[in-house]
Image: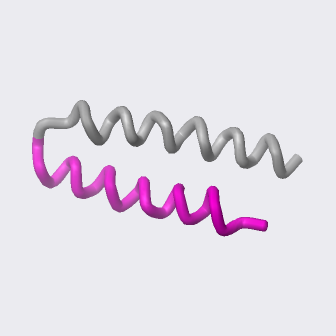
Amino acid sequence: MQIVYHLIVFYLTCHLIWCLFREKKFWNQVSVALVLIMFLLRLFLIK
């Protein structure tokens, strides 16, 4: 079950990275980066 959870978080992280580079407005990039940081922490720190 933990593998499925990690795969879902990894999938969402990939989409956030794609959205980060696609977005033109600075504040939208900042908000995507904040959400991306939370997802990366969740991906790597959950045991």
x then y, percent, for residue 19 = 32, 35
Q: How many numbered badges does the structure rendering display?
A: 0
Image check: 42 left or right of 31? right
List x then y, in percent, for residue 12.
54, 40
- What kind of secondary structure does the magenta stretch mostly adopt? helix
Q: Residue at x 63, y 56 (%)?
A: 43
Q: Is residue 44 left or right of residue 34?
A: right
Q: Position of residue 3 (x, y in %)?
A: 82, 45
The residues colored magenta run: 25-47
Q: 46 left or right of 42? A: right
Looking at this rendering, what residue extends furthest in the front direction? 44
Can residue 34 be found in the magenta stretch? yes
Residue 40 on the magenta segment: yes
Q: Is residue 25 above or below residue 46?
A: above
Image position, residue 8 (x, y; %): 67, 40
**Which residue corresponds to the image point at 53% horizontal and 57% vertical from the top-left?**
40
Residue depicted at 53% across the width and 56% down the height: 39
**Nearer the observer, 28 or 14:** 14
- From the viewer's perspective, is 20 left or right of 8? left
Residue shown at the point (35%, 61%) measured from the top left: 34
